[in-house]
Image (cartoon, rainbow, N blue to C red):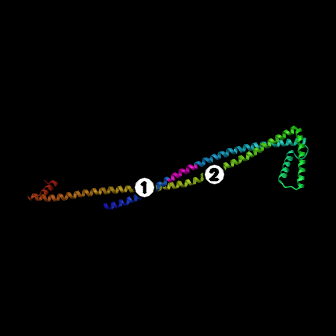
Amino acid sequence: MSIEELQKRREELRKKLGEVKEIREKFNEKSKQLKEKRQELAAQIKKYKQEGLHHKEQRDETNIRVANSKKRRRELNKEYKEIRKEIERLRKKYLPEGESLEFLNKRKEELEFKQMTHQLSKREEQELVEELSKLNEKIKERQKILEKTPELKEILEKERLIKEKGDKEHVKVRELADKAQEEHLRMMECFNKSDELYKELKKIQKEYVMARLDADKAHKKFVSYIKEIREIEEQMESMKKKEKVDKIQKERTAIQKKADDVYERFKKGEKLSTEDFMLLQKAGLI
């Protein structure tokens, strides 16, 4: 190839070099952004996993408390049943047959509530008042017996306290179970978010790998173009040096030929000019 052809090829390569450099920088920037996104997603995944594990620990701890509270409730229920048996035995011994004091009090509350909240006819009102009067008499009768029977009064109080404890334990079980369920739902929410982000992370990772491959491919082209440009420039430099040497050699040959001609004239005794003598000296002939 001639120097002109090499120069043309070099310009083409320089243009391609600029284009491939731009492509490489574009993919490098994309890789950088994807890497930052990947790090951000990884941090979010770690955060949600840690939160999920925290809620799991809270759920498991609460479930243990639920189990303990249920056990306590069962114990109280068992104790309550035993006391009820003893109460029935004492009632048969001391109280008249019929409704229990608890039943009578409950019935009284129901009638009083009905009296306050319902629009009753005169007859209905009269019947209700009469029933309340009878209930009060029965309640007073049983209360008098209780006052005279400390054994029965004591066990009824014990029954009330155990029932109260059992009711509280039941409420506690329900509240703890609700809390455990809430912690479980929060745990699942965190793990689901973590899974969704992990899917996105895998997608980002794939895009990152492709961007790096494209950037590396562009970089290899960039390096190959630079190498070819340098080879062309070295070739051009070599050709220029050869041209220079050839030119000098050509000039020397021409000078030598001219000097030989002058020298022949000198040997023939022809008159030479100052320029002719300088030419002979330059050629080393005198």
Neighbor class of circle 1 (other Cα within 10 Å; few <14, some 14-19, many 20+) is some
**Mark 1, mark 2: which one is toward the viewer?**
2
Question: Identity of the amino acid at label 2?
Answer: Glu
Q: Name the residue beneath numbered marker 2.
A: 189
| Label drawn at residue 230 | none
Please identify the dominant SS of the magenta region: helix
The stretch of residues the image draws in magenta is 33-45
Image quarter in which the N terminus is found: bottom left
Above/below status of 56 relative to 210: above
Q: Position of residue 238 (x, y in %)?
A: 30, 56
> Could you tell me which residue is drawn at 11 percent across and 59 percent down?
265
Viewer-closest of 214 and 192: 192
Q: Is residue 43 magenta?
A: yes
Give the distance between the C-alpha atoms of the residues marked 1 and 2, in whole angstroms: 46 Å
What residue is pinned by disc 1? 220
- Corner quadrant of residue 22: bottom left
Instruction: Identify the residue shown where x is 39% and y is 60%.
Output: 15
Residue 161: % across, % down: 80, 41
Assess whether mark 2 and mark 1 are in contact (beta carbons under 8 angstroms): no
The vertical placement of 259 against 60, above or below, is: below
